[in-house]
Structures are given as C-alpha cells and as structure tokens.
Image (cartoon, helix red, strand yellow):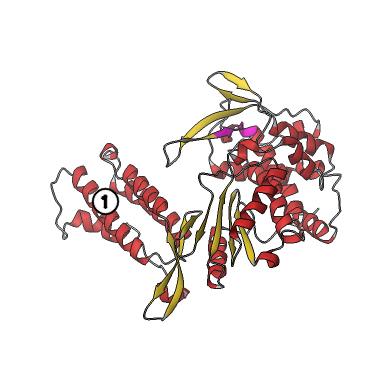
Amino acid sequence: MKTLREIQNGLYARAKSEKDAKFNTLMDKVCRSDVLKEAWNLVYANRGSPGIDGESVRHVKEREEDLVNRTYRVESVRRIFIPKSNGKERPLGIPTVKDRIVQQAVKLIIEPIFEADFHDSSYGYRPNRNAKQASLEIRRYLNYGCTEIVDMDISSFFDSIDHRIMMSLVERRIRDGYVLHLIREWLRAGVVYSGETTYPALGTPQGGVISPLLANIYLNEIDRFWAEDGRYTAEKYDAHLIRYADDMAILSGSNPETIMAIMRKLLNELKLSLNEEKSRIVTAREGFDFIGFHFFRRYIARKGREITIFQPSKKAVRNFREKAKKILNRKNLSMDEDEAVKRINHLIAGWTNYFNHTNASRIYNVLQRFIDWLFYKFVAYRHKKRQLAVSDNLYTRIYRRKLKPLKGIIRYSAVA
C-alpha cells in the first residue's frame, strides 16, 4: 500500500503534468487510517482551543467511520477576538476539534493538487516556502533597481471571500462530490458568539485549518493573471509581485500608478477591494514594511553606492518587547527562574529564526540590553533584593549560563 507521501507526490505529479486534470476520487484517500492519524497528530501538535462542543484534542482521535458512511456533519465555529497592535480586534473562528482533524485530512490530500498550480510569487502558508524567502526576493528586486513599490493591503480579505467564486476555483481541479460538499459546508458554517449563531454569506473563518489553503487558491488568481495574462505580465512594466497570503507588494522600475490601477481591477474581479488607508506607493529610499520586515535603500559613503538594508520593523520590535514584558512581569513572580528562562528562550528562538538573515545587529544589541535589564529586575524582585551583584551566584547561574543571547545576525557588508 502506498504511503501518504507517495500519494501526495503522485497527486502533485499528475496535476503538474496535466493542467486540465480533474480529480474525481479523493475521499477514499482522506478516509485512510494513516491520513487521519497524521491529521490528528498535526492538530494535536498545534494545541488549539476547543470549539463549541468543548472537546479537546485529546478526546478525539479518528472520524473514519463517519467519513466512510458519509454521516459526518460540520459543526458551527466559535467566534473569539484577539487584540491587534492598532487597538482593534481580529475575529477568529475556532472549529471543533473534530472539524479541524477532518479539515487537516482533506488538506493533506488536496494541497498537493493545488500546489502544482501555485506560482513562485506566493510564499505564505505553503510547504517549503516561508517569510525568509519572500524577504530575500524583495531585497533581490530592490538591488536590481525595482525601487518603486506598490504596497497593498486587501480590505478584510478573509471576511470578503465570495463563496461562489471560491467553489468555482476549487472545482477546476476537484470533482469528488463529498470533498466539495465538505468545503462548501466549512465555508458556510455557523458562527457562534454571545449565544447567537449567524450564517455569513461571505468569507472563511480565520482559525480553520483549511482556511490558509483556500485563501491561496483564491488569491492564486492574482498571481496567475500577473504571470500569464498578456495585460499583466511583469515584463511589460518591469514589475514583480511578492505575495504572502493576503499581504502583497509589487516592485517596479516605473509606472507604479498604472500597476496600482491594474491591481484594483484584478481585485474587483474577485469581489475584493484595497484597504486604501494601508495601501500606498512608496520609493525604496522612503522605505516600507512587509510581513514584519522594514526595507529601505541607503547610500553608504565607504562603499560609494546605495545598498538595500532590511531589518525587523518597528512594529515587530514593539511586539517583541511587549511579549518579553508579559513573561518577566511582577505578576509572574511565582514562576521560578528556570521556567522564566524557558519562556524567554522560546521567544528569542522564534524571533531569531525569523530575523537572523537580516541587517538586525543594531536592533539585536538594543533588545539584548532590554532583555538583560528585564531579567535582572525579575530575579531581583523574586528574591526581594533591590539589586544583584554581577558576581551573585544566583544571577550568573540562571542568567549568564542559561538565557539564549540574541546573536548571529548578518552585517550590512554581507548583503550589498
């Protein structure tokens, strides 16, 4: 019997070689025990919150029987709100654990099919593609002289997805009736908030396992138009699209106003619109933010030329500080130093994994001093001391030997 990886590779290979291939029989693969087990493992590893039924990941392992018998029913999602840095809130729809497992199983089978159609300009929520690759691609185009930037933000993208358009795009490849039924039901699932259930006519809830894949299927139309349609080719305007989920930037040598108008038209065809407040045209010298990075061009006298510099954005730095302060807070003094070190190290590891390829040395030095001070104060408060000597055995044992340093960043000269 074929392994899951062999099945995925086979689906991808066929989809890649046959651009018009339709996949009629997929549920037999979704229902396999090894697929459902892998789906459960992935959902469990994510450790998400329970849905409206209150069941945790530990309580649900397999839905094979319901799927095989076609008796599986999609349940409503639980609406929660998480704060954003601008003071607003982002709505999330949390499916039940059962639904998350089934969504993950379907995703494992259909994602390779759509991966064969996705374009290289897309980097978000895709296998073997990430923010580091997107940021390096932006730097490359800036170095090539594409210094006019169309910085775009789609207005309420996940809440604006048109269900009819979404299903028509899925049906280009998927013809398995029950898979289509499941996706359709996930799109129109009820949303429970404050005891009331509503049924949105648009959108897909952020928080669903399959939502990022559906988002990429939807926005792949923009990638396709830009890459393949004669009216939108990159060569025509010396312009290059970089997309990370619904965040998009186009780097061009000229005509940014024309490019912005083209993008508005493309979005309109998908019944989407630009967030005019956040979308703008800027130059590389002015600088711009994209997925947590800040890019700009600067003249370096010792080199006698301009170079591209990219580093963590001010917003990313602010978020790091806030997260560190929440961990090393006086309210957490009951937490011992080892647990505090573990949590701070986890924060530092995530930060450095994301930004270690950037020109972040100066920012890292500032943040290192901030962590030093924060942890020093935390240890002093825990032991009711006004200050700790550098030679204090407790401080050196806990801090100097165990806390990860912020280091390993490339310098300006390495990225000219």
Please tell me which residue lies in front, 368 or 276.
276
Q: Residue at horizontal 52%, vertical 30%?
A: 80
Q: In this view, does 357 lie above or below 226?
A: below
Q: x, y (%) of residue 161?
A: 67, 38
Q: Residue at horizontal 71%, vertical 34%?
A: 63
Q: x, y (%) of residue 322?
A: 35, 45
Q: Is residue 385 visible?
A: yes
Question: Which stretch is magenta?
Answer: 92-98
Please tell me which residue lies in front, 231 or 16.
231
Q: In this view, does 361 lie above or below 217?
A: below
Q: What element carries label 1?
A: helix
Residue identified by numbered label 1: 375
Residue 279 appears left or right of 204 = left
Q: What residue type is labelled 1?
A: Phe
- Residue 95 covered by magenta stretch: yes
Q: Is residue 347 above or below residue 27?
A: below
Q: x, y (%) of residue 337?
A: 28, 48
Q: Residue at horizontal 63%, vertical 63%?
A: 240
Residue 283 appears left or right of 376 = right
User: How dense is the environment of label 1, judged by Cα within 10 Å: few (below 14), some, or many (20 and up)?
Assistant: many
Q: Is residue 405 visible?
A: no
- Residue 250 covered by magenta stretch: no
Please tell me which residue lies in front, 70 or 13.
13
Q: x, y (%) of residue 1?
A: 81, 53
